[in-house]
Image (cartoon, grey):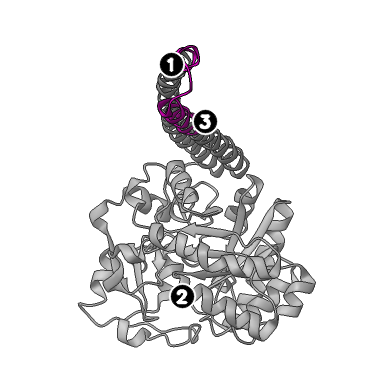
């Protein structure tokens, strides 16, 4: 979401509604007054404070998102472990080496890598298996329609081969052998461009166990950002949303404003408080991204910008977390009903076929019976009667096959409905 957009207020509100509330750790120390004196210490202090506030406001699930590329990644991860958050979400890099897995397990902290492909998933899980004799607890698959930094090259953003709908089944397949070997379910959470409850239903039909949503929750009352940040999301058009080249070397999706366009037009005087991101090229990009995102958090969009997903232009109003989740649940239920209605139509068509086959079979059986009785009266049973009996057997087998098909379809409908209802 950016710097300081999802802190204790938003995360606790989501957790109170039954979701997983996520605190974003990147640049979190900027909410502290001493950040410019000691950024590392301020980040630890800010993260610890926000975790404690979130837990005080909710008994639900609270997690922390930590970018692997952060210079203080290890310190932030250690803080999350010490505060016993429920889960850590690790992206912007591959969370493989030098991880305190034993401490994570001892503290009961679930580990959830953020990936963009089955290849990255398999690499992370295979290395974990080799190094730690363990595997992560879930994965977030983030597609190219997400906001913020993207794990897909800019040239591939419109390629269907990298779409969320394509990648989710691939990652699901990649996870299966690890789930079987380690004897535990490994949930797949899909994110990037998810906007409605219908979107949630569709991606879950493709294998996702849950979804990650950012932009819509950034435009809620409980979001920790300034009201002007939220209003910028509501006011943006589809044409305002574009791809930028971030100082960290990754493409990112944001609302293009005067601040971003001016970075290429003139030299800007700025300074980074410290090298918070490995490999950041602030001088080449003409701005410090952490400072720009923090300015946006405070509502100063002349000196910052807003990261958003591809569907941000569809946000029409600022709402509460509770109202948003209620809306999503209603849309999900409507999509579920519409889908089941389609399946029941298919079942009705099968039933019509069955009725037709039954009538044909019944008529043929009467004909065979009459022929059989006539043959008995006239003498030895001719070969034609034996042939007719064989034909009757085939017809009955076909009838049985259709009955089985209907039973399977109904079982699929009710089982899927039960699972989807539980997930919702």
Dominant secondary structure (helix, strand or loop) of the stretch shown in magenta: helix
Above or below for 17 versus 46: above
Foreground disc of the pair 2, 3: 3
Q: Is residue 128 left or right of residue 412?
A: right
Residue at the (54%, 58%) spot, across then down: 189
Res 257 seen here: yes
Residue closest to the eye, 166 or 51: 166
Residue at the (47%, 44%) spot, across then down: 201
Is the residue marked by circle 2 packed among few (<14), some (14-19), or many (20+) residues within 10 Å?
A: few
Q: Mark 1 or mark 3, which is nearer the start of the sequence?
A: 1
Alpha-carbon span between mark 3 and mark 1: 28 Å
Whether residue 32 appears in magenta in the rendering, the answer is no
Q: Which residues are drawn in magenta? A: 372-397
| Residue occupied by mark 3 | 403
User: Picture coordinates of residue 61 (x, y %)?
Assistant: 68, 55
Is the residue marked by circle 1 packed among few (<14), some (14-19), or many (20+) residues within 10 Å?
A: some
Foreground disc of the pair 3, 1: 1
* Disc 1 element: helix
Q: Mark 1 or mark 2, which is nearer the start of the sequence?
A: 2
| Residue occupied by mark 2 | 119
* Disc 2 element: helix
Q: Quadrant of residue 326?
A: top right
Residue closest to the eye, 318 or 344: 344
| Residue occupied by mark 1 | 371
Residue extending furthest toward the front: 379
């Amino acid at each position: 979401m950016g710097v300081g957009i999802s802190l204790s207020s938003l995360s606790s509100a989501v957790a109170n509604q039954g979701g997983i509330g996520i605190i974003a750790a990147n640049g979190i120390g900027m909410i502290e007054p001493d950040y410019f004196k000691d950024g590392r210490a301020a980040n630890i202090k800010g993260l610890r404070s926000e975790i404690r506030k979130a837990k005080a406001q909710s008994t639900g699930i609270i997690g922390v998102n930590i970018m692997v590329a952060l210079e203080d990644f290890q310190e932030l991860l250690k803080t999350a472990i010490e505060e016993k958050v429920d889960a850590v979400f690790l992206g912007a890099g591959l969370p493989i080496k030098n991880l305190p897995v034993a401490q994570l397990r001892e503290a009961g902290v679930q580990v959830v890598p953020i990936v963009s492909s089955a290849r990255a998933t398999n690499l992370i899980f295979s290395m974990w298996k080799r190094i730690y004799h363990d595997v992560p607890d879930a994965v977030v698959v983030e597609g190219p329609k997400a906001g913020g930094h993207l794990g897909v090259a800019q040239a591939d953003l419109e390629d269907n081969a990298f779409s969320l709908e394509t990648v989710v089944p691939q990652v699901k397949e990649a996870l299966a052998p690890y789930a079987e070997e380690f004897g535990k379910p490994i949930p797949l959470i899909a994110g990037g461009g998810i906007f409605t409850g219908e979107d949630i239903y569709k991606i879950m039909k493709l294998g996702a166990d849950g979804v990650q949503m950012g932009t819509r929750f950034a435009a809620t009352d409980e979001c920790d950002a300034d009201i002007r940040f939220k209003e910028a999301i509501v006011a943006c058009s589809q044409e305002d949303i574009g791809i930028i080249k971030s100082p960290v070397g990754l493409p990112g999706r944001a609302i293009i404003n005067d601040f971003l366009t001016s970075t290429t037009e003139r030299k800007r005087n700025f300074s980074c408080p410290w090298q918070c991101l490995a490999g950041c090229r602030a001088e080449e990009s003409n701005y410090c991204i952490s400072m720009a995102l923090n300015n946006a958090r405070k509502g100063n969009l002349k000196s910052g910008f807003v990261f958003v997903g591809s569907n941000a232009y569809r946000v029409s109003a600022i709402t509460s977390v509770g109202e948003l989740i209620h809306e999503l649940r209603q849309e999900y239920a409507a999509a579920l009903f519409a889908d089941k209605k389609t399946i029941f139509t298919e079942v009705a068509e099968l039933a019509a076929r069955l009725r037709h086959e039954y009538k044909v079979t019944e008529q043929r059986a009467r004909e065979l019976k009459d022929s059989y009785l006539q043959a008995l009266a006239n003498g030895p049973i001719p070969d034609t009667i034996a042939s007719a009996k064989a034909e009757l057997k085939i017809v009955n087998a076909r009838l049985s096959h259709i009955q089985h098909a209907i039973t399977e379809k109904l079982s699929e409908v009710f089982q899927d409905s039960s699972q989807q209802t539980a997930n919702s």
